[in-house]
Amino acid sequence: MVTTNLLATLVPGLPLFGAVVIAAMRRQLKGNAAGMLGTTMVVASFVCSLLLFLDHDVVSVMHEAGLHQEHPPEGASHIVTLFDWISIGNMHIPFAFQIDALSLTMMLIVTGIGSLIHLYSIGYMHDDARVSTFFAQINLFTFAMLLLVMGANFVVTFIGWEGVGLCSYLLIGFWYTTPAYNYAARKAFVMNRIGDVGFVLGLAMIFHLTGTLTYTEVFEKAGSLSTPVLTGITLLLFIGAIGKSAQLPLFTWLPDAMAGPTPVSALIHAATMVTAGIFLIVRSSVLFSLAPITQDVVLYTGLITALLTASIGVFQNDIKKVLAYSTVSQLGLMFVALGLGAYSSAMFHVTTHAFFKALLFLGAGSVIHALGGEQDIRKMGGLKGVTKITYVTFLIGTLAIAGIPPLSGFFSKDAIMLAAYERSPLLFAATMLVSLLTCFYMFRLLFLTFFGTYRGKAHAHESPLTMTLPLMVLAVLSVIGGLLNLPHIVGGHEPMKEYLATAADGINGENSDMSANTEWMLMGLTTVLILSVIVLAYNRFAKKTTLDPEADDLPLFSRLIARKWMLDELYSALIEKPYGWFSNTFFSVGERKLMVPLMENTGRWTQKAGKAMRMLQSGNMSFYLFGMVVGIIVFLAITLYGG
Amino acid sequence: MDGIITAIRVVPLLDYVVLSFILFSIGMAGVMFRRNTIIILMCLELMFNSVNLLLAAFSAYHSDPGGQVFVFFIMLVAAAEVTVGLAILVMMKRNVDSVDINQLNRLKW
Amino acid sequence: MADDMLLIALLLIPFLTATLLVVARPDKNARGIAMMASVACSVLVIAQWAKFPGGSLTFVEHDWVPAWGLRLLMGYDGTGLLFLLLTAVIFPFIIGAGFKQPNDRPSLFNAMLLFTQAALFGVFMSQNAFLFYIFYELSLVPLFFLLLFWGSPSPERFGDRRANVRAITMRFFIYTLLGGLALLFGIAYCVVHEPAHNADFNALAQLHLPHGTQIWLFWALFLAFAVKLPIFPFHSWQPDTYTMAPLQGTMTLAGVLLKMGLFGILRFVFPIVPDGVEFWRSTVIWLAIIGALYAGVIAFRQRDLKRLVAYSSLSHVGLLCAGLFAQNSYGVSGSLYQAFAHAILVVCMLYLVGAIQSRTGTTDLDAMGGLKLKAPRLAALFFLVMINAVALPLTQSFVGEWLMFNGLWQIDGWMAFAAVLTIILGAVYMLFAYQRVMLGPDNTRLQATDADSEDHFFLVPLIAITLVLGVYPAPILHLLDGPVQQMLSMLH
């Protein structure tokens, strides 16, 4: 027990320590020192998580207790309480961690991928003057993200939730002399804040109705809440998830967030932070399972987002923007899974997506690094001969995200699509469309970048080992990641699902009764379609020697898509501009014309009244006396006869 | 002392009241409507004395010497007041060469 | 030292030091002397806090005007101690902020600050309505002079043609005084109707006035505090005054003086007119929240950094008032906790305004930008203050706001919704301000220096307090829990 507590404290504690030390000594740490220190902390944290994971062998507990029971068995989750944080009246919010299958999975992803990306950053950020600041911030991010996933109650999760938002703000605007980057950072923070409103209100509602915010206690009481109430709570929480996980209508911050350094895009805006919304819903799966309306909302929000952003991705020319839209689209797919109640499939996709999307981003970073900062894929091409490791790993990532068997993406995406098919074939077709679009723009990206002839000017070179090593590790993970949750049909027994079932209620209920034939058929169909899309993309893009036209020269409908369905313009016209107008008007009219004059007029009226009263003070003694006498007489009369 | 009280009691109380009311009204009218400061001062004295008369009369009828003590007190104050008042009057005559009370309205705002 | 002597010392140390400063005018050492006096007070109060046993303590008890049943009654309970602590902690910093400010009459200036401090201590220790009122109005006098003699109008380019120090001072003074008169009337009315004509808070709390009376008396008692805080729509003195006042004057006003409003509501309005509060509650909460949103929206497009801080303070205060009127343990404790947080926050913000102004020579946001290139440490400090301003978790403000949101939800979900919207508005204007001052390319091309040791000496302790109390709020919450529960149990 003592070691569990210590390890659980060390997991977020080490990155925090790293962040504080690096921030405090950023002037003393020269060269790679800050990067080394930061990386060491996260690696150490990963080791601690791993030890916890091995120590916390719940699957055997499950087997002893008998599989497939209604609720997770005793001992499946372990609470580590550090101290009483907010305690007033009936509200007791301890600063506590919950160690169970779900948080351990996320901890391993965060620290594992985090370690690799830290290592990569040492090479990537090597020339930057503020490299220490970068590592301090990214370590702080790791700390916040760990709080988010480890929290034993909603409020500790919320600390992490806001913390990652803050770090995201800092890191998007890392190169702060460019106003556009600052704008992107601010946009990300504010849009997340809009989601946070839902989150905070959801928590207030939960507390009001159940009197607690600790996960285990809330979920125990969930059954006694009425469905409308649960729908309200879950919708509010979902608004929070929309903000953080960049779904409609709040997704527009994520593509802009690519302003940050590429490792940041990989870690925060692909692998970890943006999956916080999915984590939150899986964590609260008890509540969501009881609110069917919310589940439908989740499902269709995810689906529309996935379709919309996949279509935008086809027309992007910035290598990171393509990946960003792809991320939003994949997150949409995960929400589809959540909406279908396939929580373990969503988590599985979170995991594999973390592998291959981190890989793709780091690969893109390596390309950008190789080309000296060029991000426009129209000015790339033919890089497969120059940057061999990057090319091979990027190819593996692309194959994984496209869903080519037997790479990890195939299994995780397939699980979601099968769940969709069970609901309705139409839904399956829609998810299929998403994955075909994904496949198309990813291969477009791949072919334009690495095939054909080089269309740029800068001198290309391969990246150093600190950068390529993480690429190789991630590539291996992307290949074998499918083993984590190998479906029954190919001989696996879905270990991840079994593992997660010990943490989240409702995962046990997702067993499908689909026949093996149908399953094989759908898998085959998917694979054939994807392969044909690859061929299509190859014919269109692989031999390219000329630049694509600018977005403005495209046909009308394509231009609309390339302009992100005009959503940015829409928000600007509907929200930003009116808000500025209100701000100015409230000040110039509300304050200057209404409030202040109202009060100053009170003063002016007093002065006027004074002027009128002044006439009485004529200075004529007799008049005063006369007034006095009349007054006395009136007063006497009142006293004598009035009473 | 008793003789004086008896003497006072010869006249009915109401007569004293009426007389002092008349005297007071005359004094007040004078203060209110005359502009000559000397006359105003004299009218003030008249009002004082009307009150004194009333105090003395009530004191006799109620056998309470307190009233007569007040009369003396008022006389004393009145004497002091006249001194100050006349002094102001002299200064006024010197400064504005008039005893018209309305010449003194400069303190008005 | 006996406790009653200690309390008297709290009044006398600042008062006598101030008198000394006025009489002797040691202009060179004035700031140092004032600093010593206020630090001495802080030490006393912190010592009291350390040994505070809980409950309500009365230390000074003397007949004052026996004919009217007036008594000198001084002491404090947990909430009173919180406000004392707040005053004691903040004032050394307010005085310290003046070390770098140019000042032609430092003796008088610091004397005025110390007079204010003495009056504030008096207010927070009063357990008698008249005593409270006297100290309450007394605090206005030194501030009046601070504004009148040391105020500077904002330049006309901010579209403010009324930027006239005298007019603004008078507006502030008269507005506050009028509110005070309403309060005086309210107190007088209560005392007359109290059987023993006793003005002690304890006696007034037992006064069960008829329902109809309470409904109008509520406004007589509340108006003074509504103006002082201020809540919408009684706020129109505030932005101009904050903008015009000398830096330390604004710190005093926003940091401590407005907390008298909260304290007054706790001491007067809640116990004396509970029915009135019940009747007007949703009106007041909605006014406060509307004000918070209104000010938050306005702050976004302000060009003057100081005015932006003024509106942000207005926005925060609206939330404080709403939380307080929620009248449950979360709302009230949250509001009081946030009062502490807000004091520190606003003093830090204003100090930063001063620091930025001394470097760039302006408070015009349009003329700034890229200061982080020249002054990265200052930018870091600004950033740390800002995360407290937007109430990020693990800062002090979060604890307060979180409790208030929960308190408001217990009353009405829509109120909570409207109140939570402020976190968006706060993020919008604070980040925008930060960006316009610190980030972007270097617009000013000034030879600005980075934060020096004095800046660190001022800001780092305050930031440390906000972080420590954000991570571990128990010391303050523990202080509040008892009195708040007791007060609420008396209400229901």
Image (cartoon, coloured by chain):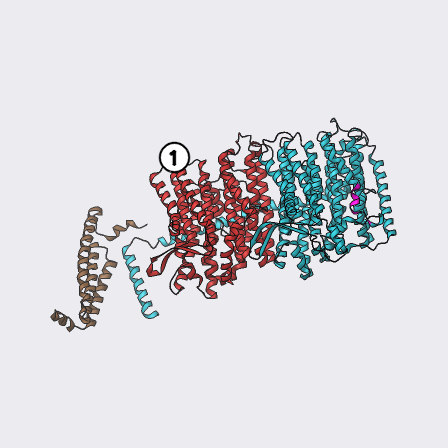
Chain colours: A cyan, B brown, C red
Indicate the position of residue A386 as horizontal and vertical percent values: 78, 28
Residue A486 is one of the magenta-drawn residues? yes
Q: C180 above or below A112? A: below
Chain letter of the residue beneath label 1 in the structure image:
C
Name the amino acid, label 1.
Answer: Lys
Indicate the position of residue A312 as horizontal and vertical percent values: 75, 42
Let me know if residue A597 appears in the view: yes
Identity of the residue drawn at 62% across and 41% down: A16
C263 or A562: nearer the eye? C263
A336 or A359: nearer the eye? A359
Q: Which residue was labeled with disc 1?
A: C28
Indicate the position of residue B42 as horizontal and vertical percent values: 19, 58
**Structural crowding at the residue carrying mark 1, measured as other residues with C-alpha within 10 Å and reported as few (<14), some (14–19) or many (≥20):** few
Q: Viewed as shown, does residue A491 lie left or right of A119?
A: right
Count the labels in the image.
1
Residue B41, quarter of picture:
bottom left
Quadrant location of the C terminus of chain A in the rendered image:
bottom left
Identity of the residue drawn at 71% across and 29% down: A372
Residue A279 is one of the magenta-drawn residues? no
Q: Secondary structure at mark 1?
A: loop
Q: Viewed as shown, does residue A621 lie left or right of A163?
A: left
Q: Viewed as shown, does residue C288 lie left or right of A222?
A: left
The secondary structure that dominates the magenta segment is helix
Residue A629, quarter of picture:
bottom left
Segment tinted magenta in the rendering? A480-487
Indicate the position of residue C313 as horizontal and vertical percent values: 52, 47
Q: Viewed as shown, does residue A413 lie left or right of C80?
A: right
Let me know if residue A303 appears in the view: no
Residue A576, quarter of picture:
top right
